[in-house]
Amino acid sequence: MRLPIRVLAVSALLALAGPVLAAQDAPAKKALTPQQQRMSTCNSQAAGKKGDERKAFMSSCLKGEQPAKMTQQDKMKKCNADAAGKKGDERKAFMSTCLKG
């Protein structure tokens, strides 16, 4: 009679300890390498960029290069595109602020 009680006690103990032991055996999350961290940072900074602009940005960002300053012509193109839908004084004020950087 004592043997079945012991067997039941041991099986109950193992059933309760199973999830605890399984959690201990699970591999811990590894820390990101510097390259993976850089990729994550650059990827979040590249939000909104598409196509060749994104490729160029990601390439320079992953190399650790500082972004090149925009030429006045590039600024004008970007600001003009961003000002779409604005008219009159609102557009003038926006363009002025945008072109100043």
Image (cartoon, rainbow, N blue to C red):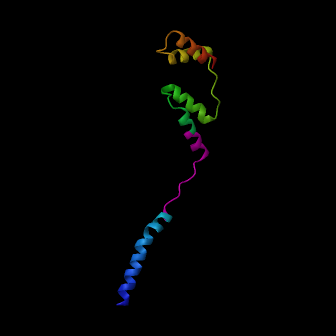
Q: Which residues are magenta?
A: 25-40
83 relative to 58, above or below: above
Quadrant where the N terminus sits is: bottom left
Q: Please say whether residue 38 is one of the residues in the magenta stretch.
A: yes
Percent coordinates x, y for residue 95 in the rendering: 57, 14
Q: Which quadrant holds residue 66?
A: top right
Q: Is residue 18 left or right of residue 28?
A: left
Percent coordinates x, y for residue 67 in the rendering: 63, 27
Residue at the spot 40% in from the left edge and 85% down from the top edge = 6
Total marks shown come to 0
Residue at the spot 49% in from the left edge and 11% down from the top edge = 87
63 relative to 14, above or below: above
Quadrant where the C terminus sits is: top right
Between residue 41 and residue 100, name the one nearer to us. Answer: 100
67 relative to 20, above or below: above
For this orientation, the residue located farthest to the top is 88
For this orientation, the residue located farthest to the bottom is 1
Percent coordinates x, y for residue 77 in the rendering: 54, 15
Percent coordinates x, y for residue 70 in the rendering: 62, 20
Between residue 63 and residue 79, name the one nearer to us. Answer: 79
Residue at the spot 37% in from the left edge and 88% down from the top edge = 3
Between residue 61 and residue 41, name the one nearer to us. Answer: 41
Q: Please say whether residue 35 is one of the residues in the magenta stretch.
A: yes
